[in-house]
Amino acid sequence: MLSSVKGNPTVSKLEDIATALQVNVSELLTNRPESALGFVIIGGQTYQLSKPSKNTVQIPTYARYDDLRNEIKEFVKKSVEGSETASKMGLVEAFEFFSLVYDKDKETFCLSLCYADGKTETILYDKFEFCNWGKSNTDDDAPWDVAQVTEEIINDIEGVVASKIQADTKE
């Protein structure tokens, strides 16, 4: 068989070899199993993963809550100081997906958490709830209490899904 494949084999030759081996032609052209980065089992079939997909969205994944806390602190600070609407998304270690959006015009943060079988929870953080009200401040110029809103967002990312899942299992 090796002697019949020397040089550049034709597509039909590759198809014949794939048929004889009971595999797809694409499987003949992939990296060797030793170079697999991981594997997945779908429908009882095991597939190797050899490289990240360049054609799909790469969602940031946070393996540790410490990393996420630092990212959220920086995001909230930059969003409040910035002049545009901003957003951040990611996947947290408990396999929950989150989306955090800052609407500059409404001065509101919106946190959406997706978990379990597509269940969602959305929480709003309005500037009026999280302001450093001074004696001379008005609704228009009261500054955000960045530390307080950041802490609340982080607590909700870390705790809301766990409490929802726990409540769902009791039902």
Image (cartoon, helix red, strand yellow):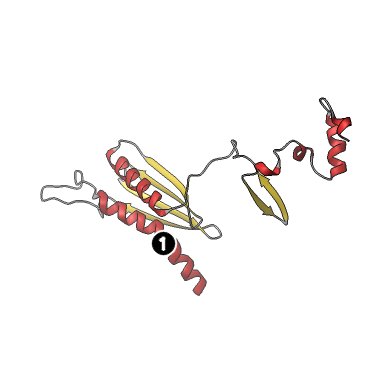
Identify which residue is drawn at 69% across, 48% down.
Answer: 47
The percent position of residue 71, horizontal first and vertical second, equals 37, 46
Q: Which one is nearer the viewer's eye here, 155 or 37?
A: 37
Label 1 crowd (10 A; few <14 / some 14-19 / many >=20):
some
Q: Which sits in the foreground, 110 or 93?
A: 93
Q: Position of residue 26 (x, y in %)?
A: 75, 38
Residue type pointed to by label 1: Val
Q: Residue at x 50, y 74 (%)?
A: 170
Q: How many marks?
A: 1
Q: Residue at image x 40%, y 56%? A: 157
Q: Give the residue at mark 1.
A: 160
In the rendered image, residue 15, in percent from the top left (x then y), is placed at 84, 36
Image position of 67 (left or right of 56): left
Q: Position of residue 103 (x, y in %)?
A: 35, 43
Quadrant (top left, top right, bottom left, bottom right) of the N terminus: top right
In the image, is 78 to the left or to the right of 41? Answer: left
Query: Compared to 48, does 120 lie above or below?
Result: below
